[in-house]
Structure formats: C-alpha cells, structure tokens
Image (cartoon, rainbow, N blue to C red):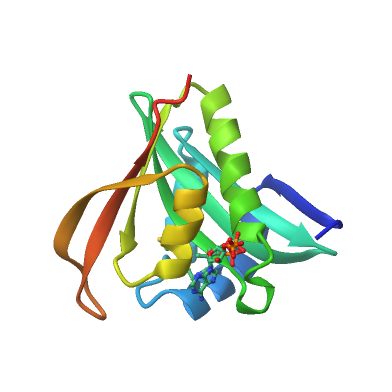
Amino acid sequence: MHDMLIRKMTEADLDEVCVIEQETFSEPWSKDDFCKALRDINNGYLVAEVRDEIIGYCGYWGIAGEGNIYNMAVKKEYRRQCIGFYLLEHLIKEAVKGGISSFTLEVRSSNEAAIRLYERLGFQATAIRKDFYTKPKEDAVIMWLGPIQ
Ligand SMILES: CC(C)(COP(=O)(O)OP(=O)(O)OC[C@H]1O[C@@H](n2cnc3c(N)ncnc32)[C@H](O)[C@@H]1OP(=O)(O)O)[C@@H](O)C(=O)NCCC(=O)NCCS
C-alpha cells in the first residue's frame, strides 16, 4: 500500500486504536493500559496509517536486551496486504537500534495467520504453554527471534 505511513503511536491515537483492539481481541487492552504502555520508556509502539486512518498497530516491551511483542493487530478489511509484516519489521528495526537483540511473543496455537507472519520474519516456535489463554481456553505457542547481530 503505497500511501501507508508507519509512525510512533501517541495518546491522540488511542481512541482509534482501542476500537480496533476491541474488535480484534476477546480480552482487549483498555485505553488506560495503552496510556501506561506509551509512558513506559522501555516500550515502543507503532501504528500504520493510511489517509489519516489507523489500520494497524503493534508494540514491544524491552528489558535486558529482550523485546516482548504485544498487541499485533491489523483492521479486518486491510488484512493480507503485508501491513502486519511491515509493521513488525519496522518495530524490530527500531528496537534493535535501541539495543534489543532477541524477541519473543506468545500466539494462540490456532492462529495460523499470525504464526505464518512471525515465521516469515524469522521467528521460530520454541515451546508450547498449555492452556495459557482463556476466552476460549487454548495453548500458546512461544516464539523467539534472534539474537540479531
Ligand atoms: C495476524 C495479523 C496481524 C496479520 O496481519 P496482516 O496484515 O494480514 O499480515 P500479512 O498480510 O503481513 O501476512 C500475513 C501472512 O499470514 C498469512 N495469512 C494471512 N491471513 C491468513 C489466514 N486467515 N489464514 C492463514 N494464513 C493467513 C498469509 O499467508 C500471509 O502470508 P503471505 O503474504 O505469504 O500470504 C492479522 O491477521 C490480525 O490482526 N489478526 C487478528 C489479531 C491477531 O491475531 N494478532 C496476533 C496476536 S499474537
């Protein structure tokens, strides 16, 4: 999508972000959860925007050289156009500049779209966490990327 912009998430984005969050997840983060995340200097959050509309976002929490990826979502009508890929690729590059070299995330074991996307970026499944998720109950696949030199 040639007119897509990827930029840092700000508090002014959160009403739009929370609409997508609520449409996407069974246990969505609140606006307050995002506000706290944005104010924590160990976090990095990005949005993808097209003509003033937020169409996706993702973020990480970094500690001791490791980045935990959270809140990866793309608006339904914009999926399968590589927006998730570009967002996460950009997030990883930014985090590496900030001294993060390894990345980890959890994903529902049935979430083929997300697992495929993470694999294309080089993530590998390393463990299963039994019944990690609720609503509905499901195993988590733990994935890791790195260390990136
Ligand atoms: C996961 C998600 C962020 C992917 O965003 P996206 O912009 O559609 O992703 P991309 O277009 O970059 O790539 C997705 C890849 O997954 C695959 N994929 C996409 N949708 C798929 C589906 N419904 N079933 C199987 N594979 C799918 C595609 O094969 C694509 O790879 P390809 O380009 O080789 O075909 C998006 O589907 C989403 O928001 N899902 C709901 C929230 C979610 O599950 N977040 C992750 C929580 S860990």
Residue 138, percent from left and from top = 21, 72
Please identify the quadrant where the N terminus is shown.
bottom right
Q: On the picture, is 59 further left or further right than 67? A: right
Q: In this view, does 89 lie above or below 24?
A: above
Residue sitting farthest toward the left: 130
Q: On the picture, is 12 further left or further right than 140? A: right
Of residues 23 and 79, which is closer to you in this image?
79
Identity of the residue drawn at 54% across and 53% down: 58
Whether residue 37 is visible, yes or no, is yes
Residue 66, percent from left and from top = 36, 31
Residue 16, percent from left and from top = 64, 69
Whether residue 32 is visible, yes or no, is no
Q: How many marks?
A: 0
Identity of the residue drawn at 69% across and 65% down: 81
Figure quadrant of residue 130: bottom left
Of residues 104 and 110, which is closer to you in this image?
110
Identity of the residue drawn at 56% across and 48% down: 88
Figure quadrant of residue 80: bottom right
Residue 75, percent from left and from top = 62, 72
Q: Is residue 32 above or below residue 21?
A: above
Q: In this view, does 63 lie above or below 39?
A: above
Identity of the residue drawn at 45% across and 62% down: 114
